[in-house]
Image: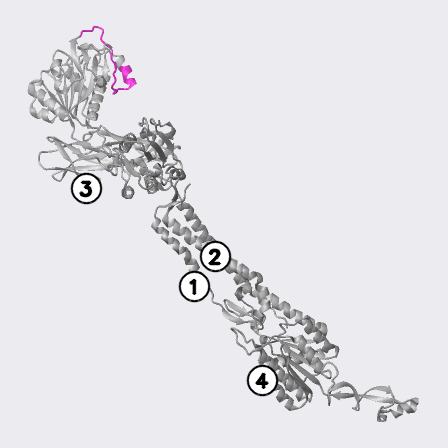
Amino acid sequence: MEALRMVRLRPRGAAEGTFAGPHKSHFRGTAVEFADYREYSPGDDIRLVDWKVFARTDRHYLRLYDAERNLLTYLVVDKSGSMEYSGAVTRTQPKLEYAARLAAALGYLVLREGDELGLSLVDARVHQHLPAAASWSQLNRVLDSLGQARADGKTDLGTCLEQVYAQTKRRGVLAIMSDFLDVDEKFWKSVDLFRNSRFDVMLFQIVHPEELDLPDVLAARFQETEGSGSFNAEPAVVRSLYRQRFDAFLSEIKANCQARGCDWYLAKTSDDPYGFLRNCFLSRENQR
Amino acid sequence: MNWPAFTNPLLLAGLAAVGLPLLIHWLTRARPRRIAFPPFKFLVEACAGQQAVNRLRTIILLVIRCLLVLALALLFARPFLKPAGASTGPQSSQHVVLVIDASLSMRAVQQGVALFGRAQAEAAEVLRSLPGGSEAAVILEGATPRSLLPALSENVPALHDELVKTQPTCECGDPAAALALAQKILAGPGTVYVFSDFQKSNWEGVKQLPAGVICRLRPVTAGAVDNVAITEAKLVPAAPVMGEPVEVSCTVFNCTASPREETVRLELGEFVQETRVTLTPFGTGNAVFNISFSRTGPVAGKVSLSPDNLIEDNTHYLSANVGKALEVVLVSDADETDWQSAAFYLSRALVPSTDAAPGLKLVRRRSQDLDRGVLETADVFVLAPPATLTGEATEIITRRVNDGARLITFLDGPTAPTMMFPMLTPPFQLQQTRQSEAGDAVALGPRKLFTELDASDFSALRFHRHFQTQTLDNRSGDVLLAYPDGSAALTLSTAGSGSVALANLPLTPDAGDFVGSPIFPALLHELLRALRHDSAEHAFMPGTAWLLDVPTTKEGAVTVTDPDGKNVAAQVIASGRTTRLALPPAKVPGIYTVKQAGNLIAYAVVNVDARESDTRPIALESLKSGENSAVTVLRGEEDLTLTNQNRQLWPQLAGAAAVLLGLEMLLLALWRSSKTAAGAKPVEVAS
């Protein structure tokens, strides 16, 4: 966690947290930073009337200030069967475990800033949903949920995201951790829902190195992780074509993210998750 | 064609090995571990074509390997195709006689292969492919044809084993005798295969091919084998004496289509000489060496050329028994100082001076002074009239001539009838005396000793001869000179081991100008030379039994050893001062050594027949086929197989196996290289 000491998560848009916090918000409040004037209407707090303007213009105008709100961060972690993969020859931690570490580190960063953190564990449906909260006990709940998560079942990220969206009250940051192997048009529509609500969406795509380059075995019977299909293949024979296919798939994900203004990060389970997260945030800062 | 039959059907059990590649494939196939792989669908897409290709490759390799094993199994079983119905028809078994030329010329090497080896291999192939129940025989054609088994035999494998052990001889082939033996062995219809180089020099003697049989002639040469040979070599005189000039003359034959220049090397006794001879295409040349022996006794050597395609005829062996000076006894009762006597002219013609007649020792005797010692040691007897021989002298001279001595008798004068030596079978009889005032001319007779140039010299002379003669039947070939009325003037004939010259010529000055002519001493010495030549010239060749006369004493057994030093079984036919040995046919040319009680007494040489050196083949189409016979000339190996009615399939199978093996290796190399290239491609991952 030392790698994350100097890192903080800052949203690209305004924060809409429940509580006042360090992040800019579109809520007008009584904070110190002036934002705009608005003509008085009945029911407004007369304490906000700028009397100096009234003296000059003989009209009632209210002084509006940008309220600094805390950040709402929603973590969506894919716990489908494909996230169980830990390598056939080159053994690493399973992708789900890597995603959990990544989520935990991110949650820590969020809570450290006093922001609110929510978590959803999903596969074909939303298994567990922790509403956003800003207490350290929330971190314990998040860690418990992540620790108890078991990778199984099929994936339907699109449906799950719709359900998560329905349960979000305010905009914030959405971090999705998955291998995105089964993304479809519905998924991207769900992402669009968040983006249209000015969510800051980050996609952490977690892959095993063997998924990039095929396991180094003479021959193997490959099986579906979320299905029953299987067949024999010699990786040496098909490696070249497979690479082309997988590279095209990654490029497609990346292009979709760029088109929607989402951040896309490719994480390999052989990498250190904290170093990886730190690099992600540094590059994010540089893009601001 | 029918289904194939197999020479070794038991080996068809090897067909079970066809399943071996399948078994090996099953045992060694990759047993893949199960991997639950999340990006399964991408792998499926990538493998969509590759897996099918890979499976196809595996199937192709398996099929190739199975076919390879199948071809090998069939190859060892040696399949062959029979003509339709051959398995049950009357043609299923055959009567076949294989005549293989084993003469000297078959030792020649053409295109790196010995002709006999080629013939042997092809004959063995014919034997191997004979259908079951066939009867066969193999005849080796040499000076005397020899059958490997006495009759047609069904035991073809045994015949095959005998055939592969045979070796070519150094003999001159006799194809006519070999074909006659083949026909005798067949004793009916059948097939005669002839494997030969078909030398024109031998096959010209074949008047007709065997009748009532199928003749298949298989030439084992591609045209004439290039060959240069020494076809003849001789010493002149053949029985030289010490100190006498001797001429070694040899004939070199160029059996090639291009002119040649060859070096001829003489190695005889202490003499080693070389000379060059130029030869025209298919022409001969002579090489002459002049030597003179400095000691007496047997001597042997050889004349040789550089080795070529046929080595055996590059050497011709020579031997001689160098004698002491030739002892000539001139018997005449006339006074040798009487210039009108024959003895006067004869003695001066024989020995003009000491230097002019080296190697000749003249002893003059009156007929009454002849003693046994002189008669027993003399080499040549010259009888000149007048002379009256005693019965003992006549008997001794007759015996000596039969033993190898030479006799010249001049029939001039009334004492001549006593000097005819009837025991020596003279070729003519004295009919009557004749008086001719003008004299008679002489002409050359059937036997050639003098040249046409000499004949013109003779025609200028006139002879007042003393006798008219009558030549006996079948003896005209001994006449050297003859008078116009048919009387013999000079004859030369053999008697026992010796020679006899009878001269019906006048030897006195008043009987013509013959004795005063320079031609007289020349004729006398030429006659002397001819007498010696005839008595010593023998040509022995491999493959024929031979008789050998050697000078011996009465003590000790005579042994003969061949060029390899092995004893030859010699049978003594006659013994005395000269022992006559009967020897079995010589197997190899070379120098044979004759010893008595361990002492060398003579050499005998055996040389190859000059006819074998002419390798030019006869036009096979010119050979006359016999009655009811079919003659086929087999030019190619395919013809040989087809005419044998069984078509061997092993060459095709061997070729198929080689192709399959090569194809498998090629495909493996190709596919492995493509796999390696695919696996080495770097990965580029988006991030």
Does residue B637 appear to the left or right of A10 in the view shown?
Answer: left
SS of the residue at dot 3?
loop
Q: In the depicted view, which residue is nearer to us: B281 or B608?
A: B608
Does residue B499 appear to the left or right of A205 in the view shown?
Answer: left
**Callout 4 amino acid:** Gly
Circle number at residue B27: 1
Query: How far is disc 2 from disc 4 in space, using C-alphas?
Result: 53 Å
Q: Residue at x 86, y 93 (%)?
A: A46
**Callout 2 amino acid:** Leu
**Residue denoted by label 2:** B61
Does residue B368 appear to the left or right of B145 in the view shown?
Answer: left
Query: How far is disc 3 from disc 1 in space, using C-alphas?
Result: 66 Å
SS of the residue at dot 1?
helix
Please report whichever mark, 3 or 1, sits nearer to the chain's N-terminal start.
1
Image location of residue A257, percent across then percent down: 69, 73
Image location of residue B261, percent across then percent down: 36, 34
Q: Would residue B418 be seen by someone viewing this image from the given angle?
A: yes
Quadrant housing residue B483: top left
Q: Would residue B421 be seen by someone viewing this image from the given angle?
A: no
Circle number at residue B566: 3
Q: Which residues are magenta?
A: B434-457
Q: Nearer the viewer, mark 3 or mark 1?
A: 1
In the depicted structure, whether residue B487 falls above or below residue A91: above
**Residue B307 covered by magenta stretch:** no
SS of the residue at dot 4?
helix
Q: Residues within 10 Å of mark 1 (few under 14, many from 20)?
A: few
Disc 4 chain ID? A
**Residue denoted by label 4:** A147
Q: Are marks 2 and 3 on the same chain?
A: yes
**Callout 1 amino acid:** Leu
